[in-house]
């Protein structure tokens, strides 16, 4: 019986430790910290995304989920899909379809205002097949990269599940971003394949800020190419042609 008070005390101490009870009395500091004087300066605003432009077309996103998530198409080196990655849409960034709307809405004169664009396919691919197969671009200089810059996919476009390009599409020997867009504009089908040559090598999981920036450039180029496919369509106007020229002039040169 003489042990019960000790056991009870031990249990109380253990309970206090688990629940965050203070085990030592707090002492009043000898020199209380000074309280900063109130200031009228406005607090620093948190960064916000660029507001969506008003107007523009009505854009309906009917893409499959596979267009939006990271994926390597094949691990088999003999496959036509080997080394091709789908680049993911990040949750804290605009989707590809939102960017398409904003790029079209930002064109002078808002030529596609009131039109309806239904997007059934918009995906960005990084085709690293040649780099992964040989690594020639990083290992050698001189003639070989020059020759490779004129080489496209060894497989036919219909043998691949996205990411095909021709040698004439490239501006350098780095693995290109290939963007494919399939949509209807007021019921009329349009399909675009746009190829962008990055200035620095990219990580397929978009780990660096430069990866995001180059993907954004590729998307902007693809949207301009998509607008070009509409230039002569009955759904567009003369203002659309002038706006397209202004949009393409604003594109950064490689």
Image: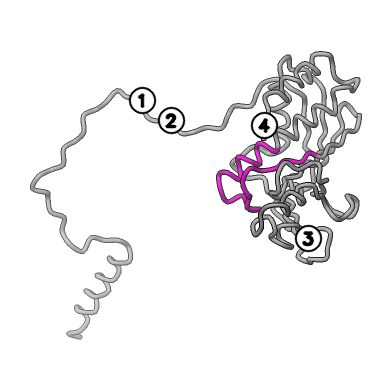
Left or right: where does residue 102 sit relative to residue 73?
left
Indicate the secondary structure of the residue bearing disc 1: loop
Whether pointer 4 and pointer 2 mark residues with C-beta atoms closer than 8 Å, the reply is no
Q: Which residue is more in the foreground, 226 or 184?
A: 226
Measured along the vertical axis of the image, is residue 242 above or below residue 102?
Answer: above
For marks 4 and 2, give the CA distance: 34 Å
Report if the CB atoms under discs 2 and 1 are less than 8 Å apart: yes
Real-space CA distance between mark 3 and mark 1, rounded to the nearest whole angstrom: 54 Å
Q: Residue at x 67, y 31 (%)?
A: 253
Could you tell me which residue is drawn at 81 percent across and 46 percent down?
A: 167
Q: Which residue is mark 1?
A: 42
CA distance for labels 2 and 1: 8 Å
Q: Earlier in the sequence, mark 4 or mark 1?
A: 1
The span shown in magenta is: 194-218
**Which residue is identified by label 4?**
253
Q: How is the image coloured?
A: one colour
Q: With respect to residue 219, does 159 lie above or below?
A: below
């Amino acid at each position: 019986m003489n042990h019960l008070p000790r056991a009870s005390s031990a249990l109380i101490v253990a309970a206090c430790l688990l629940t965050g009870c203070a085990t030592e009395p707090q002492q009043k500091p000898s020199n209380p910290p000074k309280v900063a004087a109130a200031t009228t300066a406005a607090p620093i605003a948190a960064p916000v995304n660029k507001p969506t432009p008003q107007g523009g077309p009505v854009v309906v996103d009917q893409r499959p989920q596979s267009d939006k998530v990271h994926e390597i198409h094949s691990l088999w080196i003999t496959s036509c899909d080997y080394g091709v990655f789908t680049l993911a849409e990040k949750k804290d960034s605009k989707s590809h379809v939102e960017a398409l709307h904003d790029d079209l809405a930002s064109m002078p004169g808002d030529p596609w205002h009131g039109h309806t664009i239904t997007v059934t396919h918009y995906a960005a691919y990084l085709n690293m097949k040649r780099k992964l197969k040989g690594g020639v671009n990083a290992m050698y200089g001189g003639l070989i990269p020059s020759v490779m810059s004129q080489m496209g996919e060894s497989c036919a476009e219909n043998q691949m599940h996205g990411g095909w390009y021709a040698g004439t599409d490239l501006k350098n020997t780095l693995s290109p971003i290939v963007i494919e867009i399939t949509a209807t504009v007021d019921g009329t089908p349009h399909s675009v394949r746009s190829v962008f040559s990055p200035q620095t090598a990219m990580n397929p999981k978009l780990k660096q800020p430069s990866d995001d920036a180059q993907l954004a450039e590729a998307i902007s180029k693809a949207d301009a190419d998509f607008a070009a496919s509409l230039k002569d369509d009955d759904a567009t106007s003369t203002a659309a042609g002038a706006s397209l020229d202004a949009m393409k002039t604003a594109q950064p040169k490689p």
